[in-house]
Image (cartoon, rainbow, N blue to C red):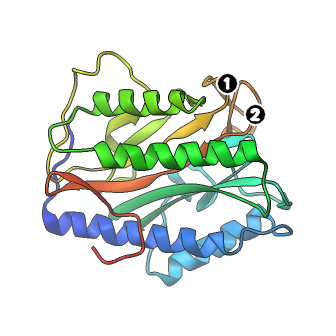
Amino acid sequence: MSVNLRRPEEIRKIAAASRAVAKTLDYLEQHVKAGITTRELNALGEEYIKSLGGRAAFKGLYGFPCGVCISVNEVIIHGIPSSYVLKEGDIVGLDIGVEIDGWYGDAARTIGVGKISKDDEEIINCSYDALMYAIDIVKDGMRFKELSACIEDFIKQKGFTPLRGYCGHGIGRRPHEEPEIPNYLEGKANQGHKMHEGMAFCIEPMICHTSGKAKVLKDGWAVVSEDGLRGSHWEHTIAIVDKKAKILSIDREF
C-alpha cells in the first residue's frame, strides 16, 4: 500500500474541492424539509455544484446514478435519490463528492427533518462526535490502525457499534485512494502505515445501533444494518498540516 504525500499547493487544490463540498452540504441542508423528494434534493445539489465550477464526482462513479448519496432513516450510506417524500421525523444522510481541476473533496452529514426522536439525536450525535474526536487526536506519526481502534472504542463507549465492511479513505487525484480507514480495528493497532505531513484523507464514522453487519438492499447500493434500525454518517476531508489534522471540507479559505 502506498499513501500519497501532497505538496502544499496540492493540498490547496484538495481544499478547494472540499470547500465546494461543504458549501453544497450547507445549501442542501437548508432545503431538507418535509415535502421535498430526495430526487429534488439531488437535482438541487448537482446544479449547485456546477454553479461552483465543480463536477458531481459521485455521478457515474462505480455506476452510481446520481451526484448526491441521500440515505434516509435505516439506510446508512449509498442511498439513491428517488421519489420518496421527506416527512417530519425522518433523518437524512447527505454524502457529496466534488471534483475541481482534477482534484477531489468528500464529506457527509446526517440531519433531521423537523423534530426527531431522542434516539435519532443520540445516534447522529455519536457519528459527529466520533468524527470530531478522531480529527482531534490525529497527529503526525500516528498509525492509521491506531486511529481505527480509537474510533471503535469511542463509538462503543457511546453504546453504539460501527458499520463493518465500509471505511474512510485517502483522497486527492482520485475520490478513493489508499489508505482504507475502517471505524474498527482490523489486526493490531501497532502495525501498518503511519500518518505523515502532506497526507490527505477522509474520516467517516458510520454508526449502527446493535449490529454492525451490513446488508445491501435490492437496488445494489443502499446499505443498512442487519438490525434494521436507523443509522448515521458524518465525514470530513482532512490533511496533515503542521503535524496535525486540518479540516478541508468546511466553508473557509485554506
| Mark toward the start of the polypeptide (1 vs 2) | 1
Q: Answer yes or no: is residue 108 visible.
A: yes
- In the displayed structure image, the side of residue 240 where residue 53 appears, left or right: right
- In the displayed structure image, the side of residue 222 where residue 61 appears, left or right: left
Q: Amino acid at mark 2?
A: Leu
Marks 1,2: beta carbons within 8 A: yes
Image quarter of residue 246: bottom left
- At a point 21% along the width and 50% down the height, the residue shown is 199
Viewer-closest of 243 and 217: 243
Image coordinates for residue 249, horizontal then vertical, percent: 40, 64
Image coordinates for residue 178, horizontal then vertical, percent: 30, 39
Image coordinates for residue 22, horizontal then vertical, percent: 47, 69
Q: Amino acid at mark 1?
A: Thr
The mark total stands at 2
Q: Is residue 42 above or below residue 228?
A: below
Q: Is residue 148 above or below residue 100?
A: above
Locate the C terminus and report the quarter of the image it occupies: bottom left
Viewer-closest of 169 and 246: 246
Label 1, on which residue? 210
Question: Which of the labelled discs sits on residue 229, or is there none?
Answer: 2
**Callout 1 crowding tier (Cα within 10 Å): few <14, some 14–19, many ≥20:** some
Question: Which of the labelled discs sits on residue 253, or is there none?
Answer: none
Image coordinates for residue 244, horizontal then vertical, percent: 21, 52
Cα distance, mark 1 to mark 2?
8 Å
Q: Answer yes or no: is residue 170 visible.
A: no
Q: In terms of secondary structure, where does tag 2 sit? A: loop
- Please identify the residue farthest to the top as the structure is shown: 187
- At a point 67% along the width and 66% down the height, the residue shown is 42
- At a point 82% along the width and 55% down the height, the residue shown is 89
- In the displayed structure image, the side of residue 251 where residue 191 appears, left or right: left
